[in-house]
Amino acid sequence: MKQLFPLFFIEIKQLAVLDYLSKWSQKKRQAESQGKKGRAAFVPSTQLHQVMSFLEKIPADILAHISYKSHAYSPALMHIEAYIKDNPLQVKEHLCFLQCIYVSLAEPNGVAGVAAVRHDEPTLDQQVIQYL
């Protein structure tokens, strides 16, 4: 148990840092774009560009799993949905995880929707999740 707590704490800290960087970049982008009028293409400052490119390099499925482990279920759903939208061929691999997120959010319609999309026979664990 002692070994799990530091890992969980590190994941929460990582999520907090990533969340802060995301919010900072949104505010900075708004501040930089307000001064410009017209239809000219937005060119971010060097600092903003570096932060935005760093955030774009982090795969959305990794962010989803970190969010889920940190009990941030809504962001986990947002990230996994973004990942599935960008990688539609990998939907099948993430159905169980998506269903777990819906269970954690107490969304029975989401759980039922994932169960309906699944083409293979669900495992016993997945059947239990479906009826929680």
Image (spheres, grey):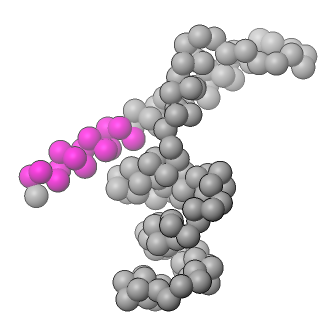
Question: Is residue 123 located in the magenta-colored stretch of the structure?
Answer: no
Horizontal and vertical percent position of residue 8: 25, 49
Image quarter in which the N terminus is found: bottom left
Left or right, residue 75 beside residue 72: right
Residue visible at 54% across and 51% down? 79
Q: Is any atom of residue 109 visible in this view?
A: no
Residue located farthest toward the left when viewing the structure as drawn: 2
Q: Is residue 50 visible?
A: yes
Q: Residue at x 57, y 26 (%)?
A: 52
Image position, residue 64 (x, y; %): 47, 53
Q: Which quadrant of the structure image shows residue 30?
A: top right
Where's residue 129, x and y in %?
Answer: 42, 82
- Of 51 and 26, nearer the camera is 51
Relative to 95, is 32 on the left or the right? Answer: right
Q: Is residue 67 above or below residue 27?
A: below
Instruction: Identify the residue shown where x is 59% and y is 10%.
Output: 46
For the C terminus, give its image quadrant: bottom left
Farthest right residue? 38
Decide which of 102, 81 is in the foreground and name it.
81
Q: Nearer the viewer, residue 17 or 95?
A: 95
- The residue nearer to you, when weighing 22 against 97, is 97
Residue 4 inside the magenta-drawn segment: yes
Residue 43 on image: x %, y %:
73, 15
Residue 104, above or below 129: above
In the image, residue 37 sits, relative to residue 74, either above or below, namely above
- 41 is higher (above) or lower (below) than 77: above
Q: How many numbered discs?
A: 0
Query: Magenta region, mostly helix, strand or loop?
Result: helix
Determine whether, in the image, residue 55 is placed left or right of residue 104.
right
Report the span colored magenta: 2-15
